[in-house]
Image (cartoon, rainbow, N blue to C red):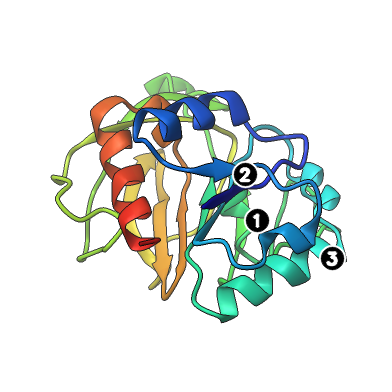
């Protein structure tokens, strides 16, 4: 059973449709204690980083405990940014902090018609092997919509470029994150979600 975390900012409908298409069993916990014993957790997200304040201490403790026990955690878009220490978008709001670093505002380029927010399809560069992205070819296109992004760190397993390079996917032990929306990224996105479900057993 996958726990799909609803904190009021996630694109739950699209994620639910994708999970249903993959025949995954999932539920939306109404209380943190319902996360105990699940096979995986997904934290989606759309919008402002400050929305993650809804994931207060009880939720942080429940999700953190699951990660410590080896339960795979997947963050999507703002959900991925929340895995880090924080974001320039809401400097006083802490992230979960299971990955080092802070998310920063992307830079636009008027001459190259690169606008902020960054919305659209970008190709992934895959610098190293990844369980989450296994079987995905470098250059696969996925769908982004965001203004802030995580830096390229040793945890980065896929990057892309919008003026500068940023982390498109991260992976460390049982923690996974994607800046793009796999639920809106066609076959490539479903492939990634299928890999995640397999990691959940």
Q: Earlier in the sequence, mark 3 or mark 2?
A: 3
Answer with the quarter of the image where residue 85 lies: bottom right
Residue 43 numbered mark, or none:
none
Residue 197 x %, y %: 37, 52
Q: Nearer the viewer, residue 149 or 176?
A: 176
Question: Can residue 133 be seen by looking at this rendering?
Answer: yes
Give the mark toward the camera: 1 or 3: 3
Q: CA distance from mark 3 to mark 2?
A: 19 Å
Q: Residue at x 52, y 30 (%)?
A: 16
Residue in the foreground of this view, choosing between 88 and 79: 79
Q: Which residue is mark 2?
A: 78
**SS under mark 1:** loop
Quarter holding the C terminus? bottom left
Q: Residue at x 21, y 65 (%)?
A: 128
Q: Position of residue 15 (x, y in %)?
A: 51, 32
In this picture, is 36 found above or below 113?
A: below
**Residue 82, numbered circle:** 1
Query: Residue 3 versus residue 104: which sits nearer the camera?
Result: 3
The answer to whether residue 158 is left or right of residue 135 is: right
- Give the secondary structure at mark 3: helix
Identified at 39% across, 53% down, the residue is 169
Q: Is residue 8 left or right of residue 116?
A: right
Verify CB contact (< 8 Å) between mark 3 and mark 2: no
Instruction: Give how far across and how far down residue 36 sits, in percent.
Output: 66, 67
C-alpha gap between disc 1 and disc 3: 16 Å
Q: Are marks 1 and 2 in contact (CB under 8 Å)?
A: yes
């Amino acid at each position: 059973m996958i726990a799909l975390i609803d904190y009021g900012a996630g694109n739950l409908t699209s994620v639910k449709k994708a999970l249903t298409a993959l025949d995954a069993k999932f539920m939306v916990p109404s209380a943190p204690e319902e996360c105990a014993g699940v096979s995986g957790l997904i934290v989606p997200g759309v919008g402002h980083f400050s929305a993650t304040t809804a994931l207060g201490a009880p939720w942080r403790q429940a999700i953190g405990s699951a990660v410590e026990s080896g339960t795979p955690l997947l963050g999507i878009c703002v959900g991925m940014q929340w895995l880090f220490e924080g974001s320039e978008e809401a400097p006083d709001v802490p992230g979960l902090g299971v990955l080092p670093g802070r998310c920063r505002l992307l830079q636009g380029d008027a001459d190259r018609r690169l606008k902020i927010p960054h919305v659209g399809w970008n190709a992934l560069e895959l610098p190293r092997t990844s369980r989450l992205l296994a079987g995905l070819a470098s250059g696969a296109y996925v769908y982004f919509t965001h203004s802030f992004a995580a830096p390229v760190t040793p945890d980065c397993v896929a990057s892309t470029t919008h003026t500068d390079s940023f982390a498109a996917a991260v992976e460390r032990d049982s923690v996974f994150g994607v800046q793009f929306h796999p639920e809106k990224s066609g076959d490539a996105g479903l492939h990634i979600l299928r890999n995640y479900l397999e990691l959940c057993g």
